[in-house]
Image (cartoon, grey):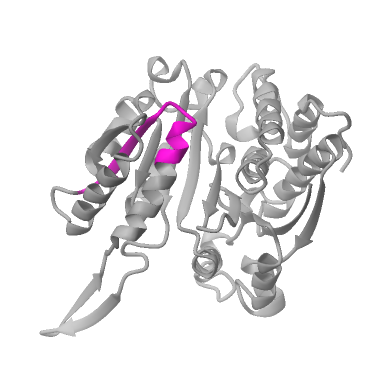
């Protein structure tokens, strides 16, 4: 297989963890006989330094000419967010990509291996057998893309953000969720606020209509406030969770805590043509950039998602996931998930272990 991939490492720890992900991708290419052409481009502060823009047209063009986008992290130190280089950096980068390529569905798997139960803040008895939830968040609707207005009425400031959904938007992401559930444990939990919001009432109606096409999948409906509680109270009850843009933004960040570190969580954002962007769920962590200690797992697992969703290479994707799990089971840990008695390693050293566990003919371990 020959594929072209746009690689956008970004800022902070982005370039160093992307380097490790590229090593893994190279190993897969060598071992399974594929050719992956990597076209590197800039976004975030790195792009601003060269182009005066967080998402320059040059980068968008590289993405248009590629079969998938492998993204890192963007953004600078919190103390420098007022500077023009970093102001609105993440929104200008990520939202620009979503808008340009109409990425409507975000996949965010949240997995916790039993061996990592100690890094989860929940009681051990709730997570001792591990956690495996797939969140699917709608990305192009809701208040994030609705009409916005700030006015003065009777001498007072008034602001509004319109949250709206069309039935086609809801149906599109609902089909994605039910299809995903068919390959998992066949359960979808749809999260809304249908007891109050009209947009949520439409959401619930349309999801029910879509569910009728998937008789083998169980549909549960849950109000968002209850879901926020249930994620903490009994996370094992969830399989696939589908929800709106705003609720998904909040719930996925909450659920990320279950894994113990954002450095473990990859994500994928897809459009209706199958074109997709793959990225870690965490940020650029400028406070540890350049030290070689960042957790590369989320970036590496983003490669696995890319192989699965964009290139239909299930065996190769599973090889990466199994290799990561094997390294973790053997006790290798980066600093963010380390506990006394385990093997503390840096970004490169952890990736070395992953490469040793990929069941392919040859693996590149240098770099």
Q: In this rendering, is residue 104 above or below 24?
A: below
Which quadrant of the structure image shows residue 148? Answer: bottom left
Residue that protrudes farthest toward the left in the picture? 154
Q: Is residue 274 magenta?
A: no
Q: In this rendering, is residue 148 above or below 258?
A: below
Q: Residue at x 61, y 77 (%)?
A: 53
Q: Nearer the viewer, residue 47 or 201?
A: 201
Q: Which residues are magenta?
A: 178-193
- Residue 233 spot, x, y in % from top left: 30, 26
* The C terminus sits in image quarter: top right
Q: Residue at x 71, y 46 (%)?
A: 17
Q: In this rendering, is residue 270 above or below 130?
A: below
**In this picture, residue 145 sits left or right of residue 158:** right
Which quadrant of the structure image shows residue 49? Answer: bottom right
- Residue 141 spot, x, y in % from top left: 36, 62
Q: Would residue 332 be visible to someone looking at this image?
A: no
Q: Is residue 181 magenta?
A: yes
Q: In this rendering, is residue 5 above or below 96?
A: above
Which quadrant of the structure image shows residue 75? Answer: bottom right
Q: Residue at x 39, y 14 (%)?
A: 125
**In this picture, residue 23 sits left or right of residue 100:** right
Q: Nearer the viewer, residue 219 or 367?
A: 219
- Residue 290 spot, x, y in % from top left: 73, 50
**In this picture, residue 115 sits left or right of residue 248:** right
Q: Would residue 261 be visible to someone looking at this image?
A: yes
Q: Residue at x 65, y 48 (%)?
A: 288
């Amino acid at each position: 297989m020959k594929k072209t991939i746009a690689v956008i490492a970004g800022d902070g720890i982005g370039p160093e963890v992307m380097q490790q992900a590229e090593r893994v991708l190279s190993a897969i290419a060598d071992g399974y006989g594929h050719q992956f052409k990597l076209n590197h481009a800039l976004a975030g502060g790195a792009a601003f330094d060269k182009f005066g823009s967080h998402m320059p047209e040059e980068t968008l063009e590289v993405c248009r000419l590629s079969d998938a986008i492998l993204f890192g992290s963007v953004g600078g130190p919190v103390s420098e967010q007022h500077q023009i280089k970093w102001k609105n950096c993440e929104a200008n980068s990520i939202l620009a990509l979503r808008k340009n390529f109409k990425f409507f569905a975000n996949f965010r798997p949240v997995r916790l291996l039993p061996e990592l139960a100690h890094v989860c803040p929940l009681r051990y008895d709730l997570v001792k057998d591990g956690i495996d939830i797939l969140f699917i968040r709608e990305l192009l609707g809701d208040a994030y893309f609705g009409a916005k207005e700030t006015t003065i009425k009777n001498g007072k400031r008034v602001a509004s953000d319109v949250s709206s959904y069309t039935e086609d938007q809801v149906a599109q992401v609902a089909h994605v969720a039910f299809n995903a559930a068919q390959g998992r444990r066949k359960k979808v939990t749809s999260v809304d606020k249908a007891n109050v919001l009209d947009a949520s009432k439409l959401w619930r109606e349309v999801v029910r209509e879509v569910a009728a096409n998937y008789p083998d999948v169980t549909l549960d409906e849950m109000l968002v406030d209850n879901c926020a509680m249930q994620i903490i109270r009994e996370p094992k009850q969830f399989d696939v969770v589908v929800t709106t843009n705003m609720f998904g933004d909040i719930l996925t960040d909450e659920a990320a805590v279950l894994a113990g570190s954002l450095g473990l969580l990859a994500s994928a954002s897809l459009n209706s043509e199958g074109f997709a962007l793959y990225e870690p769920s965490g940020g650029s962590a400028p406070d540890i950039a350049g030290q070689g200690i960042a957790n590369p797992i989320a970036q590496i697992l983003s490669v696995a998602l890319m192989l699965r969703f964009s290139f239909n290479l299930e065996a190769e994707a599973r090889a990466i996931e199994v290799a990561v799990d094997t390294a973790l089971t053997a006790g290798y840990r980066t600093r963010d998930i380390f506990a006394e008695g385990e093997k503390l390693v840096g970004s490169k050293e952890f990736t070395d272990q992953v490469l040793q566990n990929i069941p392919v003919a040859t693996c590149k371990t240098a770099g």
